[in-house]
Amino acid sequence: MRELAGRSWSAGGDAMQITKLVQGIEDGSLSDLTHLDLSNCKMNELPAQVCSLPSLELLNLGGNNLSSLPDDIGGLVSLKILFFLGNKFERIPPAIKGLHNLETLSFKGNRLVEVGEDRLPLSLKALILTNNKIAELPRSIGRLQKLQKIMLAQNELMSLPDELADCNNLELIRLANNRLEAIPERLFLLPRLSWIGLAGNEHLTRAPHNIAKTYSMEDLEMFEQIGRGASGCVHRALLRPTGTPVAVKIFHEEEAISDGSPWDEIAIASSSLIGIVKEPKLAAITHLAPQGSKILAKPPSLASITRDVYTRSSATTGEHNDTIVGPLSLSAVIAIAYAMANGLRALHDAGICHGDLYAHNILVEPSSLWACLLDFGASFCFHRDAMKAPLPVPLLLRLEVLTVLAYGRLLEELLGMTDGVADARDLDAMESLQQLAEGRTGGM
């Protein structure tokens, strides 16, 4: 048994600990748990006793063999976060709907073929259904008025219900590597939608072409890890044929990531890559960032859903913190804003939608204010020529609007990290940026 801080408990992937957990619930010693990790315990069934934990807020059941749930799982009246990564569910159990306070639900990497009508609690803010076999979504999806994020990449969707556009709080949607032939026009008009991924839907997007040179791992002298993301790890390296210091991103998987395909990511970014490696693992070779560069923020947390987490004080950082620590100077905000605007303009001129404009994808060197937009994992290509584009012209134009909305949100967040104004010129600049941010987001 491994007890974590507070009222948390983890089996540590040891199936033998499940008996001790059940005993602890029954005798009351573990009846007040708030966080429970039963991942990788090879369970075929969830013990019914777990459903009697009234204070439980997070339950991780990933990496088991579950295909059904006890009918009384609704007894978890405080549950907010529920993970089923890598189980064997073919359908979402009806009992899930009884979790009236559930905010985040993940069935990533299961065997889902359908979601089912009215199977989801109306309290959901984040729904992760990546890497399944879902062919259609229920019309009742539109009843999820609190939904902010929905992850649907790596499925078999050919269409989306028009009712999805009734989710007025939706901000992020991932649809890469499906079989979509059309998108409901109303979806693009959602007032808060800022981040979208469409790569790998051949009827909607333009296939990218990889022009990067191919190297072998023998051409690289690998050093320490300098970064890590959802799709891979980044290492400092030396490209032996030229003696060039480089950064190498090694992808976790070649077939599927949460936002799209690594091959699409490489092809889209290939004009700026030094090269790629295909074996033993897929890797991208890029220019090494200036020394001292740091990520602008951390990715969204379970609590923030779609918003990045900024480090506002050095007192909250670790010894090897790799993110920028606030407050930011107004000159830094302006420099980052201009760099991102120029980068986004170049991408759109090339018919590329980044799809993931976030501070956690921006690398900054604090002293020179050098800034670079990273991670093309959610990016996709579109036809700028309306005669060739499979999407209607209004939707093509809306793709650029979505990126502008994300840009406005970024400006708002950066302005919230500033250290104030020093003189009248700073005040004018601050007001101009605030007006720009409000104009881009509609004051949301």
Image (cartoon, rainbow, N blue to C red):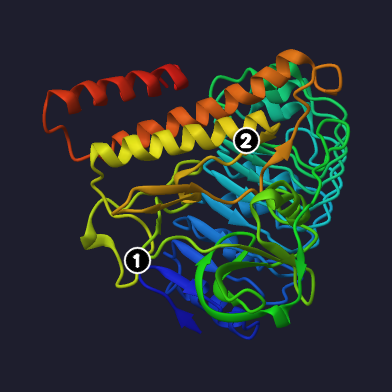
At 44% across and 38% down in the image, what residue appears? 339
Q: Position of residue 274 (x, y in %)?
A: 66, 61
In the rendering, which numbered label is found on residue 141?
none
Instruction: Judge whether residue 194 can be spotted in this image.
Output: no
Which three-letter amino acid code belongs to the residue tagged 1? Asn
Nearest the viewer among 32 and 189 is: 189
Determine which residue is flagged by label 2: 347
Give the residue type that dot 2 points to.
Leu
Return the x and y of residue 66 as percentages of the image width and height: 76, 64
Tell me the distance, in whole angstroms, between the alpha carbons under discs 1 and 2.
30 Å
Mark 1 surroundings within 10 Å by alpha-carbon count, few (fewer than 14), some (14 through 19), many (20 or more)? few
**Which residue is labeled 1 in the image?**
321
Residue 307 horizontal/vertical position (percent): 45, 41
Which of the two marks, 1 or 2, is nearer to us in this view? 2
Task: Name the quadrant containing residue 426.
Answer: top left
What residue do we see at 49% from left, 43% from top? 358
- Answer left or right for 419 relative to 16: left
Left or right of 323 in this view: 404: right
Residue at the location (88% across, 38% down)? 179
SS class, disc 2:
helix
